[in-house]
Amino acid sequence: MSLSCKYKYELSVIIKTFNEEANIGATIDSIRSNIHDINYEIIVADSLSLDATQQIALDRGVKVVTLNNADERCCGVGHQLGYLVSEGKYLLLLDGDMQLEAGFIESAIKFLDDNQNYAAVAGAVEMDDSSNYEFKARKQKIAIIYPFGDVNHLGGGGLYRSSAIDEIGYLTNRNLHALEEGELGLRLTSAGYKLHRLDIPYFKHTSYELSTLELLKHRWNNGYLFSHGELLKSAYGKPYFMRAVKLIKSELVFTAYVMLVLLVLVFGGFSDLLISLLPLVAFWALKSLKNKSMQDGFMSILNLSSFSAGIIRGLLTPIKDPKEKPSYTILPKDE
């Protein structure tokens, strides 16, 4: 493969991290074990971890770039931070709790080399078992969340063409606490590019070992639940706004329903309230039957209710220019 003179490496692997000391070593090792005959760099883009994440990465001899301000932490800033210091023709996006699968890189690069109208490609996702509701539900819907073929976004990351990212101005939106890959897909497809998911293994994912309630509390505190509102606010006035609405339609429909119930509670009578609650009872019953668990039915409602509250909170969050660089430092390797 010929390497464009614009790029120092064929591939930049960007790993976004925050407190991943338990996993980052395995992530780096999986990259080195499964990439061969390619000139590449590994970049750990860290959001000021409070544990040994940075030191473990430095000890393994990779480039570490870190935020300078803790208040800029979010999912969207991580890969963008790595992109700002990357020098690769292609960008592979991973999280610090993922392990790269063998053979993906070679197949993904060949696909992009052979299909110049595609900006990115991903592969199949393998998730471990988890006790909390959200990750159990995600694993049940894995074929829906990560479909094969041409898609409008690549959840979970993928291999991206650097020239396409340069064209649209930035990699991931520094305002978003989640859904950054969805927003990236919206911008790339609006620019005329295509995206594809191959039916080959891409990465293994380590789920959070938290209960459902603990995970929801964690995601409220770190802003994850605000992402749907942040996405709407950042996409407003853009040509892809309605597609952003479609991307989160389930959460928006549930939010609209909750607002309706609240209006009935304030202005309606008791019988009106009972009628308004019937769809919620039906939803709980269907979820309980599908999962054979009444608790899962309640947890589904709690999960959606949390996202509804997060949408409102996200809409109230100030939006920064996503092309503006966050303050960062590249750490010396001898630290």
Image (cartoon, rainbow, N blue to C red):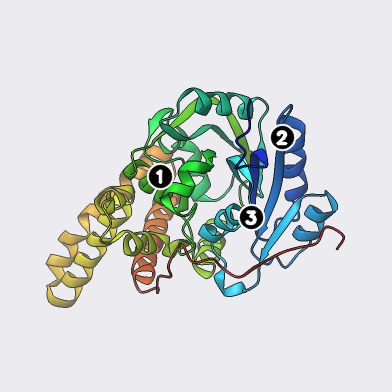
- In the rendered structure, which amino acid carries the disc numbered 2? Asn
Q: Quadrant of residue 88?
A: top right
Residue pointed to by mark 3: 85
Q: CA distance from mark 1 to mark 2?
A: 27 Å
Crowd around label 3: few <14 · some 14–19 · many ≥20 (10 Å): some
Residue pointed to by mark 2: 39
Q: Position of residue 127 (x, y in %)?
A: 58, 38
Left or right: 174 in relation to 246? right
- In the rendered structure, which amino acid carries the disc numbered 3? Val
> Circle 1 sits in a helix, a strand or a loop, which is it?
helix
Q: Quadrant of residue 9?
A: top right
Say which quadrant the N terminus sits in.
Answer: top right
Left or right: 24 in relation to 180? right
Outermost residue to the right = 334
Q: In terms of depth relative to the viewer, which is nearer, 329 or 8?
A: 8
Crowd around label 2: few <14 · some 14–19 · many ≥20 (10 Å): few
Q: Position of residue 285 (x, y in %)?
A: 32, 46
Crowd around label 1: few <14 · some 14–19 · many ≥20 (10 Å): many
Q: In terms of depth relative to the viewer, which is nearer, 142 or 157?
A: 157
> Circle 3 sits in a helix, a strand or a loop, which is it?
loop
State the residue at coordinates (23%, 67%).
259
Q: CA distance from mark 3 to mark 1?
A: 22 Å
Residue pointed to by mark 1: 185
Q: Earlier in the sequence, mark 3 or mark 1?
A: 3
Q: In terms of depth relative to the viewer, which is nearer, 104 or 321?
A: 321
Vertical order, 82 against 48 (above or below):
above
Q: Count all numbered tags in the image, as a single digit.
A: 3
